[in-house]
Image (spheres, grey):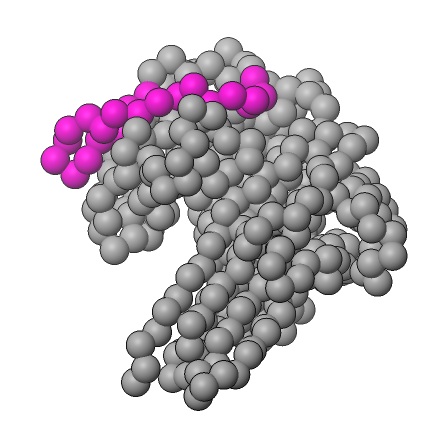
């Protein structure tokens, strides 16, 4: 078999989209993953009762598709950890698919385009300058949160190489968004509906018996709250990961997320541990009075909590160094949500 040369760059680009604006869609040389957190939703008074969706109609994504794999992975994570299920919405599917197609069409052999904005009205897949405009154009409405993942892979010789399946790519894209800060906030936002859109472009070039391959992959999801939001209930909290989480990614590169949760870390190869998230409902006041992360020997793991840009109902704890693969860790949060005391204690395992 010929020697295989593989170069795959996957850089997270988070563009914050507020209630009336969108992120720009500039060219990034050989790009990455991307997302929009729920900055568009205003703080509201804390609700008194829970209204989480525990059952939804089955999704109609194609069997073995990336959309179905991503949907299933997120549904399990949200259900396991108490954030509520999401109902598939075909209008959100349409909006997400159009943007993924726009991004692929906007790129070329040297530049991959990434971002939440669309500024080229002549692009055949242009449907709106922002996620809100695109969701409205599809007939849904403006109350959405967008997450994007974009990767470009290069294979020096694709002969004899077993490429990832569509399902594997979709699940990996969803996992990458959950292993972040702002992306995770978006994926666990309190909407009731979701739509996915994936577009892939393969470019092969044959020369001297070798076939080089470039794969551009654009993955998008929209969480919608046009019909209302899911509520944990006053004084209640949910976390990701949680006690049912297994196979959690054990490392995160902050500089691959934009906005970077730790701006002083500029090296994209520098890694910390996976972000650990806890939240109450929007409009609540979450006070975390104590927090800890311990390894399977009971030793404290050093963490940091100085993540910027969070709502008053949110809190992140991030290990200062990558965790160890295939190990069990214990988490404990203690505090109050709108004056009601809580203790959130659980174990999770990292992937091998």
Q: Image quadrant for the N terminus?
A: bottom left
Position above or below: 289 against 57 = above
Q: Nearer the viewer, residue 52 or 120?
A: 120
In the displayed structure image, the side of residue 90 where residue 73 appears, left or right: left
What secondary structure is the stretch in magenta mostly built from? loop
In the displayed structure image, the side of residue 297 where residue 106 appears, left or right: right
The residue located at (55%, 68%) in the rendering is 215
- Residue 343, x across and y down, in percent: 37, 23
- Residue 260, x across and y down, in percent: 50, 31
Q: Image quadrant for the C terminus?
A: bottom left
Q: Nearer the viewer, residue 58 or 183?
A: 183
The residue located at (56%, 22%) in the rendering is 309
| Residue that extends furthest to the left in the rendered view of this protein | 297
Residue 343 visible in the shown view: no
- Residue 345, x across and y down, in percent: 32, 30
In the displayed structure image, the side of residue 228 where residue 71 appears, left or right: left
Q: Residue 50: within the magenta?
A: no
- Picture quadrant where residue 191 is located: top right
Position above or below: 352 against 5 = above
- Residue 276, x across and y down, in percent: 40, 33
Q: Residue 303: within the magenta?
A: yes
| Residue that extends furthest to the front in the rendered view of this protein | 208
The residue located at (68%, 40%) in the rendering is 145
The residue located at (87%, 52%) in the rendering is 121
Residue 94 visible in the shown view: yes
Position above or below: 160 against 134 = below
Count of labels in the image? 0
Range of magenta residues:
291-313
Q: Nearer the viewer, residue 170 or 233?
A: 170
């Amino acid at each position: 078999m010929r020697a295989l040369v593989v170069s795959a760059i996957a850089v997270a680009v988070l563009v914050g989209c507020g209630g009336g604006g969108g992120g720009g869609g500039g060219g990034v040389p050989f790009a990455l993953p991307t997302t929009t957190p729920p900055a568009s939703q205003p703080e509201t008074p804390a609700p008194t009762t829970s209204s989480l969706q525990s059952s939804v109609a089955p999704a109609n994504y194609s069997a073995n598709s990336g959309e179905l794999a991503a949907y299933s992975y997120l549904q399990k994570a949200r259900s396991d950890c108490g954030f509520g299920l999401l109902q598939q919405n075909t209008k959100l599917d349409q909006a997400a698919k159009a943007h993924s197609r726009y991004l692929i069409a906007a790129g070329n052999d040297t530049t991959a385009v990434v971002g939440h904005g669309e500024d080229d009205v002549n692009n055949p897949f242009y449907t709106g300058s922002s996620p809100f405009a695109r969701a409205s154009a599809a007939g849904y409405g403006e109350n959405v949160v967008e997450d994007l993942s974009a990767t470009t892979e290069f294979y020096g010789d694709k002969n004899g190489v077993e490429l990832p399946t569509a399902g594997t790519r979709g699940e990996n894209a969803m996992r990458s968004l959950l292993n972040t800060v702002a992306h995770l906030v978006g994926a666990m936002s309190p909407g009731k509906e979701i739509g996915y859109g994936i577009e892939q472009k393969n470019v092969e070039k044959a020369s001297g018996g070798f076939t080089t391959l470039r794969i551009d992959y654009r993955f998008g999801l929209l969480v919608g709250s046009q019909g209302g939001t899911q509520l944990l209930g006053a004084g209640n909290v949910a976390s990701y990961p949680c006690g049912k989480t297994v196979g959690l990614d054990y490392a995160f590169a902050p500089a691959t997320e934009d906005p970077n949760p730790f701006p002083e870390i500029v090296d994209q190869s520098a890694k910390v541990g996976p972000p650990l998230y806890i939240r109450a409902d929007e409009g609540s006041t979450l006070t975390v009075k104590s927090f800890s992360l311990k390894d399977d020997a009971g030793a404290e793991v050093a963490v940091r909590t100085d993540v910027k840009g969070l709502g008053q109902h949110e809190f992140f704890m991030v290990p200062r160094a990558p965790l160890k693969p295939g190990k069990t860790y214990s988490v404990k949060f203690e505090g109050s949500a709108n004056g009601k005391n809580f203790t959130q204690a659980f174990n999770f395992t990292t992937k091998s």
